[in-house]
Amino acid sequence: MIQRSISGMVGKGSLTHNRRAFKAKNVKEDYTQYNIEYCNENIECVYHELFNEAQERYNAKQTRSDRRIDNYYDKIRTGKQEKLFHEVIFQIGNKEDMNTQSEYGELAKKILDKFMKGFQKRNPNLRVFAAHLHMDEETPHLHIDFVPFVTGSKRGMDTRVSLKQALAEQGFQGGTKRETEWNQWITAEKQELSEIMEQYGVAWKHLGTNRKHLDVLEFKKQEREKEVVELTTQKKEMDQVVQEMQETIMDKTEEIKSLQGKKEKMEKELLKLTSNKKIVEKNISMIREDEAWQLPEAAVWMTAKNYREKKAVPLIEKIKETLVSALIENVRLNGLLDKMKKRNEYLQKQVQHLDQHLEQMKKENVDFRKEIVMFHQIKSELGEEEIKRIVESQKEREVLEMVKISQKKRDITL
């Protein structure tokens, strides 16, 4: 039985990266087709699903309008007490012993797939709205994004967002600083993953620390360097995403303007058609009431035959011709009117959909900018020269890694 390590860590929650709306440099695009998307729901819709009824119950009890909650999603998004959602990443082994391009990579994919399919059932208080298994990076890994919620709460809304309480409801009671609810839960999920691994002939390799020889300052320095490298990469990705989103927002804005122009044109056509219909109705009313369209009285000296041929028949023929024309025009106008109304309704829905999409993109744009601000705070703390040194060091390591891989390929060929 082979042995492999297990890692379970907090993710950055970059939804656009997870669903490959944009691709970072470390993504191998040829392998993206082997990724698995388990779900990718709109988080705002999930919030409405989870909390709308609780929000209504809460608001019904409030006597003061300033204590009412208009939109729970916005309240959490703009607040500081709870995160909008959380992400956890699970991985088996590393790029050396579980590389995506090897047979072991396929084995990792099967294990993580089975692990993911039981995740929601094991965690009823963690509503998963996005989950992706990535096979287009060095090592297969699983991103799981979820909204933690608790029911039966005595404070605030009876159903509300709370990671601590959600995990507590699932049996993970926090203790010491090390044994938090989150750490206990991660350990339990790792244990679950290890049991699935054993079904495939893989044992859990528990890693110990190899940093005992480092003093505290050196260890902190190494950890900080890793953080800077990660944030530098993340900043570049965020800059690219922000730029792409700004371009998309401009495109969507133009599209909305175009649709609004079409909508206004349709409204004018509808007005014109309505006006034409009124003219037809007016003409029909005139036919009914105007004396010129009434059958005249027969003169005393006029025979029935003369009256029929000279008075009745011409008038009836005129009426028939006019009414047939009016009916045909009326049917045509009604048909056009129905088509215009349906087209107008369609355009209204399109404009509404684009407006919602635009708002969502603007919100994501705000989140990306917050992450960029965090990077600048790290940069301010360490200084620009230190950042450059760390980034250059990372580049050198990447070049050496590429040289090693190239050398291995040459050795295999020889």
Image: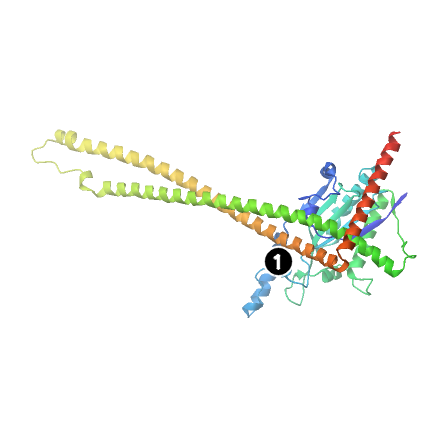
Q: What element carries label 1?
A: helix
Which colour assignment does the render follow? Answer: rainbow
Residue at the right extreme of this rendering: 213
Q: Nearer the viewer, residue 332 or 258?
A: 258
Instruction: Give the residue drawn at x 73%, y 62%.
Output: 164
Q: Nearer the viewer, residue 327 or 296?
A: 327
Instruction: Give the residue drawn at x 60%, y 65%.
Output: 58
Q: Please state the horizontal and vertical placement of residue 209, each as a whole percent of the image.
A: 89, 55
**Residue at image mark 1:** 73
Q: Can residue 130 be seen in this view?
A: no
Give the side of residue 272 with respect to residue 389, left or right: left
Count residues near mark 1 (Cα–Cα under 10 Å), then give few for <14, some for 14-19, many for 20+. many
Image quadrant containing the N terminus: top right
Instruction: Give the residue drawn at x 69%, y 46%.
Output: 17
Residue at the left extreme of this rendering: 301
Q: Nearer the viewer, residue 300 or 19?
A: 19
Give the side of residue 77 with respect to residue 63, left or right: right
Q: Is residue 301 visible?
A: yes
Q: Which amino acid does label 1 sit on?
A: Tyr
Residue 200 sits in quarter: top right
Looking at the image, residue 64 lies above or below residue 352: below
Q: Please state the horizontal and vertical placement of residue 276, each as a whole percent of the image.
A: 33, 41
